[in-house]
Amino acid sequence: MLTVYEVGAFRLDPLAGVLTRSGVPQSLGSRAVGVLAVLVRNAHSYVEKNAILDAAWPGVVVEEGNLTVQISAIRRVLAQVPGGDRWVETIARRGYRFVGPVKEVTLDENRKSAGWSKRSNLPEPLTSFIGRERQLAEIKRLLPKTRLLTIVGVGGIGKTRLALQLAAEVSEAYRDGVCFVELAPLADPSLVPNAAAQVLGVRDVRGKSLTEALSVHVRNRQLLLLLDNCEHVLDAGAMLVDAMLTKAADLTVIATSREPLRVSGEQVYRLSPFTLPDAAASAEAMAQSEAVQLFVERARYRRPDFELTQGNARAVGNVCTRLDGIPLALELAAARVHALSIEQINERLDDRFKLLTDGSRAALPRQQTLHATLDWSHGLLSRREQIVLRRLAVFLGGFSLDAASFVASDIALRGSEVTDLLSRLVARSLVEAEIGNMGAARYRLLETTRGYAAERLAEAGETDDIRRRHAQYLCDLFNLAPENWLRMPDMDWRALYAKELDNVRTALDWALSVTGDPSLGVALAGASGPMWLELSLHGEGRGRLEAAMERVGPTTSRLDQARIALWLGMLFGEAEPIAAGAAKTRAVELYREIADATGLGFSLVQLAAASVSSGRFERAAQSLAEAWPLLENARLPKPLARYFDTAGFLLRQTGDPVRAREHFERALKLFRNAGAEREALRMLGNLADLTWSLGDLDASVAAFRESVSRLRNSPLTTANMLGFNLANLAGVLTEKGDLAEALAAAREGMPLLTSTGNGWIHADHLALRAALVDKFDVAARIAGYADSQYASKQAPRHPNEARARTRLFALLRAHFKNGEVDNLLAEGAVLNDDEACRFALED
């Protein structure tokens, strides 16, 4: 049984870590929810500060000021209801007491799991689920017998809504949860693996396809993957699904598409329209029709007093029948009841259907019906509403009011008018508004509507002009994104910029094309650099920045070039130290030319990090020395944290782990002060690694286990971060002699690192473990692989890896005769990353 709490108008779910109001999650971080949960569980009783800190920050030493910040955040959210800000009382210098209304509610586990679970990323439904009980039951019977089930049907028939409901209701049957991947925003089929990788937290690297990395990631997971709207990327979707299913025995895929994927073993489920009413039936009998139920339910959104009566039942039945029971068509029709009678709606539908009767006979009737509905909806708009609708077609993944006003306006149509016209389009259900209690509203067109509007845009001859305005808007929006990334808490930065990912993609596609505007493309590519890092889209980001670099011309500003070079170097990272160093060197030169002190200081720190990774310690020290006064003067916590992080890295590599710890601890504090939670998590792993370097193996094991636990429970975790901590844990356990536990940790961690191109860094520990269990041939081959990787990347080993290699070669020399080791090392040197990883982790 699960316990949640009704807190006045709010609902608190401690297990899910969320506070909702009317089903809408509130903008309250996990720490604040944890604090509130402690107070609510002890409602009307005084709770000491230390008890709250221990419960909300288990095992972590935090400053008391953090608690004050969280209490303030809680009060701001509760203040949405009268007097809510007074529900948390302060007991001076002692603690807090919750005095608001609290009701404990116990939920059945099955009821909880039927909702949108914490183990999934399924979007919360904004409308009720109508009908489809028979289809749900049929698909549930099919699902255990197939690994790929494709729900097929015409656009607007409700494939996505049915798939989401199905996934929510069966989610508990999958140990590793449910992942929803929306493909509708993708204009480029090659980005299908990228979309899946972003949801699954998988990064790609050079020399290995993202499809391979995804297949490795899901290999040992019992997961339900929902791929939505595959029809426009059918071949790419089919290839990805086939590759992943071949590698992962416990993976199940549900796809929605207008046609089958045609992958071996595919179970196709063709979705029919909603059941239609009998024209002669009574109002009570007609209400049993799924189409009528949907129409009436959606009509009430526009007219709360709308009812199905004996007087209007026949007219409602006619609307549903003439729209063939297609959900999207029904919803568009129902949206008109605030302005038209049911009889008037019927009359207009009649006119449009007659118009389309003489259309293409090759098109399916249902496609004609849906297009007729959109034609009819479009015909109801004023000329200025039609202009705005077609211009909104340029957006992918949603848009803000400011974006709509900028892109859709022109000399004859002011931005203020666009605001009003957009509101009318929302009222007519042609644009969806996502309005939460916090933050500005965001809008989007349904994919079918967007495609229809794009046709109208092309007919008007406006496509290139509007795409240019779209790219210009994004260029203006992202102009300060790199500087804001240094100044803003990560959560605030992502809230402002990350949601524009699909818009940035389509803008770059156009701007860097033959018919586009390369100056806009280059500027946007450099300005959007932090986004690819934040969203762990390293491979895609590198590709886009390299494409932009090729379009740099004589008139390209030094700032745009500097940004491209800096973020390209950061995206190369430790996996490609040579390429990273070259790009960061260029960034330093450019920032120095334009006298940007903060940009120069930060790029010098990045160059220092690349120099340490490639063993150029003197150069790293020089870069840090030049960077320090620039960053100290800027007084920005995140760049300063990066400085101490890199300085600690240099100290560790040059044999001063004690001072390195001081720098890492200072970096950790600064990252937390800056709101850079992901970087703070990374620093915890660095500190555990340093403890290992200092020789305290037991403390290091405990620290790595704590870090792994935090990473498993954090939405900010990347495959690389978790992989590094698990692989390091395996290394410490190997040094301690806990070889079985070391293998278990390595088997989880190494595939994650190999998928990001960083597995080679930890190969020495795998080789040492193999030697300690008398698998000397394996040990020597893995050692050869490790040596070849370090040599090709011109990278020195970290202290722990160097110590493992020294011990390993002592064992190898003692076991083998002269010449035998060299032959095995040579065999290992030609292994690729996957081969070496698989070879090392075998029993």
Image (cartoon, helix red, strand yellow):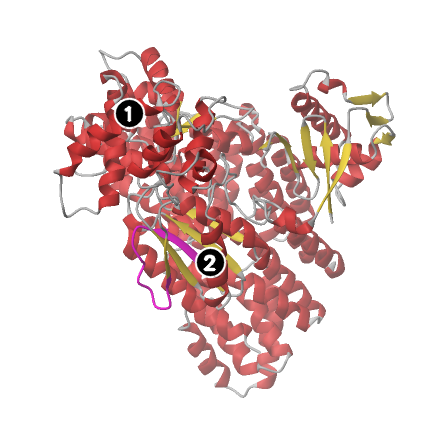
User: Which residue is rendered at x = 42% and y = 65% of the image?
Assistant: 245
Dot 1 alpha-carbon crowd within 10 angstroms: few under 14, some 14 to 19, many 20 or more: many
Residue tagged by mark 1?
Answer: 389
Q: Secondary structure at mark 1?
A: helix
The part of the chain drawn in magenta is 253-267
Q: In which quadrant will I find the C terminus?
A: bottom right
Residue tagged by mark 2?
Answer: 138
Q: Is residue 254 magenta?
A: yes
Identify residue type, mark 1. Leu
Q: Is residue 334 magenta?
A: no
Please give the label number shown on residue 723: none
Q: Is residue 418 left or right of residue 76?
A: left
**Depth order, front residue of 530/112:** 112
Q: Is residue 5 left or right of residue 409?
A: right
Image x and y of residue 526, in percent: 35, 34
Q: Is residue 49 left or right of residue 34?
A: right
Q: Nearer the viewer, mark 1 or mark 2?
A: 2
Residue 46 picture quarter = top right
User: Which residue is rendered at x = 25% and y = 26% of the image?
Assistant: 348
Badge 1 vs badge 2, beta-carbon distance below 8 Å: no
